[in-house]
Amino acid sequence: MPQRILRRSILTTVLFLLTTAGTSSRAFAQCPPAACSGTHAFIDFESLTPGTTVEGLGAVHPDLRIASVAWPFGPSCTVGSAAAIEEGVATPFAAYGTAGAFPNGCLDGIRGFGDTQGCVLDYDYTFAPGVTVSCFSIRMLDYGDLFPFGGTTHTVTLTGYDASSSQVSQDVLTMLGPVNLVSGDACTAQASDPGNHLFTVSGAGIVRVTLRFDAFPDPNVGYDDISFCEESRVTPTERRAWGELKVRYR
Ligand SMILES: [Ca+2]
Ligand SMILES: [Ca+2]
């Protein structure tokens, strides 16, 4: 390779690394596009007006269904009530408060989603028919500065399952001891602290991802930055072709 082209190639690589280094940790969460051989999806929630529901297939992405699930250990929020939230805006709810009771502070950007304060919801993430993912990631914010249900161990678990309901991958956050007003606050937590934590599951053939809280959670949290990598997808054309095939061989 001529010297000039080699230099340009190195410069391009350095620029690429600098660019991705500045955005990969927050913008793309932990399912980076470069590692996705299929179709990459990233949802930052910035386009959703506060109060817009995030639940149901297509609400935030054509191939993703967010569905809240009743928390079995105590006060569950109303199933189906998860909605877009905005920093500094207490409507439809302050899913959590940061210093000075500031609602929904320090999301990535100014918008994410959450549910009502003081109650808990578990979540299921599933995909459009025929879609499987090889990676799924979500950011949870402000976990660990309030533990009204007591307990000494506080565990949040993201689990990916395949079509036969076998576990593919699991990511567990365990926080020990009492509240921590620094690492548990969305605005003062460092990356990967409970207060600003990315959960990621990866592996072949994931069709369902569950987010589950144990009996002693922080009920006031928010979510942001969902990314996933679609590894397979049955296109409408293929479905039609299969139908024709069945007719032909009936
Ligand atoms: Ca956001
Ligand atoms: Ca909290």
Image (spheres, rainbow, N blue to C red):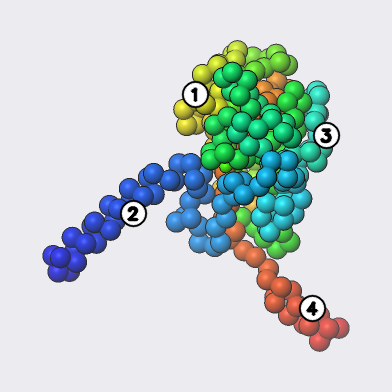
The reply to whether dot 2 and dot 3 touch (C-beta < 8 Å) is no
Q: Earlier in the sequence, mark 1 or mark 3?
A: 3
Density class for disc 2 (Cα within 10 Å; few <14, some 14-19, many ≥20) is few
Q: Earlier in the sequence, mark 2 or mark 3?
A: 2
Residue farthest toward the right in the current orientation of the protein:
250
Q: Return the residue at label 3.
A: 78
Density class for disc 3 (Cα within 10 Å; few <14, some 14-19, many ≥20) is some
Question: Ligand 1 sits in which quadrant?
Answer: top right
- Disc 3 is placed on an element classified as loop
Q: Which amino acid, mark 2? A: Phe
Q: CB at mark 2 closer than 8 A to ligand 1?
A: no
Instruction: Name the spot of residue 160 as percent of width and height, x first.
Output: 65, 45
- Mark 2–mark 4 distance (CA, rounded to whole Å): 45 Å
Q: CB at mark 3 closer than 8 A to ligand 2?
A: no
Q: Return the residue at label 1.
A: 188
- Disc 1 is placed on an element classified as loop
Mark sitting on residue 128: none
Q: Earlier in the sequence, mark 3 or mark 4?
A: 3
Q: Return the residue at label 4.
A: 243
Instruction: Name the spot of residue 17 as percent of width and height, x first.
Output: 33, 50
Instruction: Name the spot of residue 180 as percent of width and height, x first.
Output: 55, 16
Q: Residue at x 73, y 16 (%)?
A: 149
Quick check: 218 above or below 227?
A: above
- Mark 2–mark 3 distance (CA, rounded to whole Å): 45 Å
Q: Earlier in the sequence, mark 1 or mark 4?
A: 1
- Mark 1–mark 3 distance (CA, rounded to whole Å): 29 Å
Which of label 3 and label 4 is nearer to you?
A: 3
Q: Which amino acid, mark 4? A: Gly
Q: Earlier in the sequence, mark 2 or mark 4?
A: 2
Name the image quarter holding the C terminus: bottom right
